[in-house]
């Protein structure tokens, strides 16, 4: 071998010896880097799992907080006051309202006793029976927003503080019922005679009632001479019904009602019962309403048929008119009583502060039973023991002025003049053929 070849061979061997350690070192580095990458991937997966677990915990905590908030909202107690409409406390599906009205009147009246003396003193409120009450509802969560409803209402005398009916706490209302859009309003217990309600004659009996028929209780009172027309819209137990069942429904423009009063005479299911049907139509600027009532009082039949309405002639003037026909069987051979009565009135509202009312009514009684003092009995009175009758007319002209300080407080001046003719004697006038009364009063609603 030549020297040149020996040199080349030696160089190649030297280069190979130098490259072998470098290749071994590179393989080790690659394996180490791969191991580090795998470790980093494992750590990233662990961190992702921890993050997912933390997110799940956060979502669970948020859901729990939302449920707690909803539960707190459902159980929260809210108190709301509405001007003149009471204090309402509500919690979840339940609500109850405490409300009332105080009316005090300074009276001036002639012929206030049998000798014709005059009285000047605060007496039973002129326009509204003083009252306080509780009303409320419970949403059952059922279909059509079905609610259980109730009302307890008591009347008192503002001039003395006495109960209006001694020994009877809730003498105005004590009823329980159900209400929904499809059912209407169904109530059981002591309540207004349906015929006097805003579903019937309250829309035309006088100018103080609502202009539109509705499902609420209300109606005119019987505290003075011109308010006696209400007895034609009564029942076997006066202007309210004991043991009553009343159904009312608003169909849109039409409001209908049915009422039944159970009797309480053992062995005679029909004695003491009252049946009433009412129907009203609310137009754009008028309302027409009417009712039929039949009662069995001491085995004798009483019946009233009535129709009337009102019209809002303008924003200033509303006119009301109505007619009543009443018949009653009477004891022995006295025959049947037949009454015809009518009323017309108007309400002027020039502003929100002032309003004025004027009305006239005639009650014409034919062969009407009289009591022991010779006074004509009210409609739907017990006629089983009467021994005499009378025929005549009772006429009353009345008017009033109201000043509304705000939605809760108002003052009024009112007057009426009663006159009777023929054999008609009015108990209010103590047998005199006329009576004039005037009242100055204040009313407050809470």
Image (tube, grey):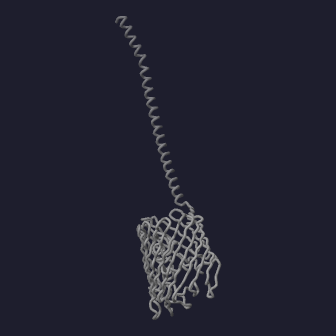
Residue 307 image-quadrant placement: bottom left
Asked if residue 341 lies left or right of residue 108, the reply is: left
Image position, residue 95 (x, y; %): 53, 65
Asked if residue 373 lies left or right of residue 296, the reply is: right
Q: Nearer the viewer, residue 206 or 90?
A: 206
Q: Is residue 403 visible?
A: yes
Q: Is residue 267 visible?
A: no
Q: Quadrant of the N terminus?
A: top left
Image position, residue 344 (x, y; %): 48, 75
Q: Quadrant of the C terminus?
A: bottom right
Task: Residue at the far left: name it.
Answer: 1
Image position, residue 241 (x, y; %): 50, 79
Image position, residue 143 (x, y; %): 42, 65
Residue 64 drawn above or below residue 305: above
Count of picture labels: 0
Task: Residue at the far bottom: name it.
Answer: 333
Q: Nearer the viewer, residue 150 or 278?
A: 278
């Amino acid at each position: 071998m030549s020297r040149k070849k020996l040199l080349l061979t030696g160089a190649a061997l030297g280069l190979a010896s130098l490259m072998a350690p470098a290749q071994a070192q590179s393989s080790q580095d690659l394996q180490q880097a791969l191991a580090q990458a795998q470790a980093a991937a494992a750590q990233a997966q662990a961190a992702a799992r921890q993050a997912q677990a933390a997110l799940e915990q956060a979502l669970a905590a948020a859901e729990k907080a939302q449920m707690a908030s909803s539960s707190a909202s459902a159980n929260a107690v809210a108190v709301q006051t509405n001007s003149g409409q009471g204090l309402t406390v509500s919690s979840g599906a339940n609500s109850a309202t405490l409300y009332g009205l105080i009316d005090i009147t300074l009276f001036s009246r002639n012929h206030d006793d049998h000798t014709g003396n005059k009285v000047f003193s605060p007496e039973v409120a002129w326009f509204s029976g003083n009252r306080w009450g509780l009303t409320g509802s419970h949403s059952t969560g059922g279909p059509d927003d079905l609610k259980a409803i109730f009302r307890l209402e008591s009347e008192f005398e503002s001039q003395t503080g006495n109960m209006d009916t001694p020994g009877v706490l809730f003498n105005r209302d004590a009823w329980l019922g159900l209400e929904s859009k499809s059912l209407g309003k169904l109530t059981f217990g002591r309540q207004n005679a349906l015929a006097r309600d805003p579903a019937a004659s309250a829309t035309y009996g006088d100018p103080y009632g609502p202009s539109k028929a509705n499902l609420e209780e209300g109606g005119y009172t019987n505290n003075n001479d011109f308010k006696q027309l209400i007895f034609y819209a009564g029942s076997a137990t006066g202007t309210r019904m004991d043991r009553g069942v009343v159904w009312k429904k608003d169909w849109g423009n039409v409001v209908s009602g049915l009422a039944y009063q159970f009797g309480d005479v053992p062995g005679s299911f029909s004695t003491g019962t009252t049946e009433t049907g009412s129907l009203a139509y609310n137009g754009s600027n008028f309302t027409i309403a009417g009712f039929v009532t039949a009662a069995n009082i001491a085995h004798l039949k009483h019946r009233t048929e009535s129709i009337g309405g009102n019209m809002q002639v303008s924003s200033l003037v509303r006119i009301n008119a109505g007619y009543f026909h009443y018949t009653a069987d009477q004891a022995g051979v006295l025959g049947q009583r037949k009454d015809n009565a009518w009323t017309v009135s108007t309400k002027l509202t020039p502003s929100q502060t002032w309003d004025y009312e004027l009305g006239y009514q005639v009650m014409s009684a034919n062969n009407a039973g009289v009591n022991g003092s010779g006074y004509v009995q009210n409609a739907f009175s017990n006629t089983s023991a009467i021994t005499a009758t009378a025929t005549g007319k009772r006429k009353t002209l009345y008017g009033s002025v109201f000043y509304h300080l705000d939605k809760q407080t108002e003052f009024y001046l009112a007057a009426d003049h009663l006159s009777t003719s023929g054999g008609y004697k009015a108990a209010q006038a103590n047998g005199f053929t006329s009576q004039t009364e005037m009242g100055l009063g204040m009313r407050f609603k809470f």
